[in-house]
Amino acid sequence: MKNVVLYPSPGMGHLISMVELGKLILKHHPSLCITILTITAPFDTGATGSYISTVSSTTPSINFHHLPITPLPQDPSSYPTFETISYELLTIHNPNVHQALRAISGNSNVLALVIDFFCTPALTVAEQLNIPAYYFFTSSSAGLALFLYIPTLHRNNAQSFKDIMNTFLQIPGLPPIPSADMPAPLMDRTSKEYESFLYYTTHAPKSAGIIVNTFESLEPKALKAVRDGLCVTDGPTPPVFSIGPLIATHGGDGGEHGKKCLKWLDSQSKRSVVFLCFGSMGFFSEEQLKEIAVGLERSGQRFLWVVRSPPSKDQSRRFSAPPDPDLGSLLPDGFLERTQERGLVVKSWAPQVAVLSHISVGGFVTHCGWNSVLEAVSSGVPMVGWPLYAEQRFNKVALESEGGLVTAIEVEKRVKELMETEKGFSIRSRITALKEEARAAISDGGSSLAELDKLIKFWRKK
């Protein structure tokens, strides 16, 4: 029995991405077995267990191996960021990963261990057991080019990026990037987060290969730069396989909550609604929420807006799921009543894939998380980018971001520009073409399926 073991870092998004990769492999190579190693994180809300149960019942070919619970040496609330928790948690889990892989190897031939970016500590375990280790990079090829080039930037710059904010960085395959747009964990080279990311990016080229959730025609320059070895300047670059777009279609319409969104969309005209959603960690202050509301009202556009509660000021709760927002207190007085004929505000969550696929949706204001970008591209919905965290600034190459508070005037301008102007129509034309290219990539004979077949051949050589 030939087995491929997938190892995602903690967090629902990482797990879903790995499950979708497993489904893709099984769809086209059903003779393989998939085992997913899972960690119980201190900030797990319980949704992970429910999701795993659903996957186990609907896709029994995917097996889950739960690693023993290993507590952090400190209280989770004492860690400054999510990244520092992940690094610590995944490092102390290495003995459990070693034990799990040995047990799985006793019953099957493990062809490969596929890890995500934060699971880099497991590279040493794979090496000890002589198992080829591959990365599944769930962000863009632009993000991959950046991350692989970080060790070179580190060697060539003695200053922290936060101290050279107006300097433009030359990264192979990308347009010039302001230092101010670097991901937050990389801004201070003396921080623990920077040290962790430098460790990840230094070790990534030592893997047997890198799988990227993109497709050839979406990011040709970044992919070429990585494959040509321009981003790793002190050694060879492993093979890179672009197998996307990989879209999570789980969850259907999201139950009664989701059905409300879709029913409302059913009553709207074709391509008339702008959808605003900023991801599971897309938190705004009360002041910013009010600015968005005023901008939407002034724009005169129809809208579906997902609002989450502002981040908690209680440091011990900053990694916990926030409560549903109190819309009456967070939004301007009378806003909901004045816009009820053309807008719908939903609390915390909406079935994003189903919403973007709906014929009534004509625009998407997004945080530029890569999954959201791919979902919009695959649905042919033009985007306004509003990057909030992680690598998202690199996912919105063409859009400016001023940082700080985005005013109501700016919100109004961007929404109207997308929905009413020639520029908006031009963006729509390009995104429609990309939709067809995305569909072709994952069809028989497409570039992404060819890349997947090439990857499986690498594995079977073991």
Image (spheres, rainbow, N blue to C red):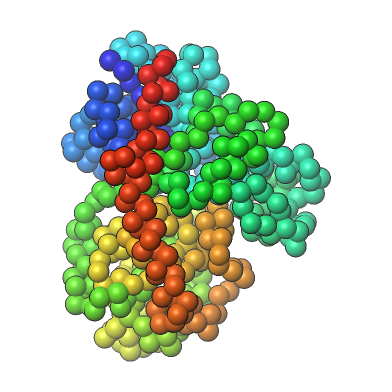
In the image, residue 294 sits, relative to residue 160, either above or below, namely below
**Front residue (pair 436, 412):** 436
Q: Please say whether residue 451 is visible from this viewpoint.
A: yes
Considering every residue shown, the one lying at the far front of the view is: 445
Where is residue 268 drawn, in percent x and y?
23, 78
Residue occupying the point 44% across, 75% down: 424
Residue drawn 19% across the image and 73% down it: 266
| Residue 14 on image: x %, y % | 41, 42
Answer left or right for 273 relative to 416: left
Residue 294 sits above or below residue 60 on the image = below
**Is 364 placed left or right of 125 in the picture?**
left
Query: What is the quadrant of the C terminus in the image?
Result: top left
Which picture quadrant has residue 403? bottom right
The picture quadrant where one finds residue 204 is top right
In the image, farthest residue toward the right: 158
Q: Residue at x 22, y 41 (%)?
A: 54
Q: Residue at x 47, y 20 (%)?
A: 132
On screen, residue 402 above or below 230? below
Instruction: List x then y, in percent, for residue 126.
Output: 49, 20
